[in-house]
Amino acid sequence: MSDKTNEKNKLETLEKRVQELEKENAGLKATLEQEAQEHEKVSMDLAIGLSEAFVVLQKISQGDFSVRASEDVENELLARLGVVINRTNDALSAAKAQTQNMIKELATPVIRVWDEVLVLPLIGTLDSQRAQHVMETLLERITKDGARIVILDITGVPYVDSLVAANIAQTMEAVKLVGAEGMLTGIRAQVAQTLVKMGVKITGVETKSNLAEGLKEAFRRLGVKAIQEKQPGD
Amino acid sequence: MAVKQLDALGIKCPQPVLKIAAMLPDMKAGEILEVVADCPTFEKDVRNWCQRLKKTPLWFRDEGGGKVRCQIQF
Amino acid sequence: MAELSFLTFRGNIIVALHGEMTDSSVRNFQSHLLEEIERIHARGLIIDISALEFVDSYMARVFVETAKMAQLMDTRTVLVGMKPEIAITLIQMGLSFEGVFSAVNLDRGLEILEKERARKRGRR
């Protein structure tokens, strides 16, 4: 009898222990699941953050500097990555802007050949964007230097389209309006054809065959005399 | 348009999704990437990723043995 | 707009415009200016617009018109100090400034008036 009671007691203790273990097990399972979920979330955030960084970098590599990587994300690593990408982007776009400015400046070399005489020799093809820039640069210089005579030499321009032709005509008019005399030199056969065929009027502007003739005319107007001291062969 | 292939078998999430992410610079808009993986959360992760990156998951196919194949349009 | 003040220098009227001009103040400017030309028998007129940040097509047209009116009264007009960006805008709007002289600054403006006067004397 006592044996049986003993056995029963033992069984009850065991059952209790099993229940306790099951509880513990369930707790562990829940923790594990929670950790797995957290791990999943972190890794997914990382994957998406990296994907976004890739997208931004791809755009930058295509020359689009307007994109920004996000810097205020929860993940510190991704935030750092964003900061570095943006810094690189800034440096690249600054370098690009500087180069473009340099090209623009080189493309519009306004030269002061004499007191109050400016020469702008244009070389290469003109598109309307460059023609617009030429106009702005030239007018700024006239106002700044107080130039009297401006010679636009287009010997180095093989041909123009109608838009650019109109732009040249406008430039000459604007030159007059800010208070200088414009002169156009070195008009090529093709350019002359375009100007006339397109009906572009270049009014009140002296045209000379080449830059040397233009300079002579400028000197004549200013009352400057160039004297050749030695004849060639003397 | 050629469909690009990506093998993500034998690796656990999030690695397959990271592999897809790494393909981003080579994918033009509209191009299709085909991925095969055997990670259990693969479909869920890809759908999630596609939603966040605004890409289109075209289809998912269970190929048995835990293998899932899918196509994503970039 | 601030009150207009006309300066007289060697028979020329010099007027400097500044601030914002409304259409009515532009018209006002024109009639006052022409009255002043008549009053002192001005030989030349200089309109200094170097302080104007902005010239619209109406103002520009009034300037050209005023110059033509002054011309009828035997007065030459010089526009002085037009900013490059204003010149570009007005030209691109297709406005014509025929019959109006322009100068970079006041000195040049007076120079042009002197030259015009000499030319007229020579013709006589």
Image (cartoon, coloured by chain):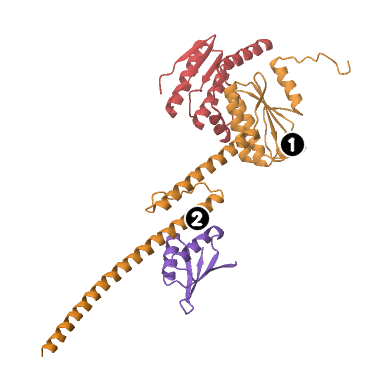
Chain colours: A orange, B purple, C red
Q: Which residue is labeled 2 in the image? A: A55
* Number of residue marks: 2
Question: Element at badge 2?
Answer: helix
Letter of the chain that mark 2 sits on in the rendering: A
Q: Which mark is residue A212?
A: none
Residue C100 visible, this orientation: no
What amino acid is at disc 1?
A: Ala
Give whichever of discs 2 and 1 has the lower sequence position: 2
Q: Position of residue A230 (x, y in %)?
A: 83, 14
Question: Element at badge 1?
Answer: helix
Q: Which residue is labeled 1 in the image? A: A192
Q: What residue is drawn where x is 16% and y is 86%?
A: A7
Going by the picture, which residue comes out furthest to the right? A233
Left or right, residue A125 beside residue A87: right
What amino acid is at disc 2?
A: Val
Q: Position of residue B21 (x, y in %)?
A: 49, 61
Q: Nearer the viewer, mark 2 or mark 1?
A: 2
Going by the picture, which residue comes out furthest to the left? A1
Depth check, front residue: C81 or A112? A112
Letter of the chain that mark 1 sits on in the rendering: A
Left or right, residue A109 beside residue C83: right
Residue C12 visible, this orientation: yes
Going by the picture, which residue comes out furthest to the front? A3
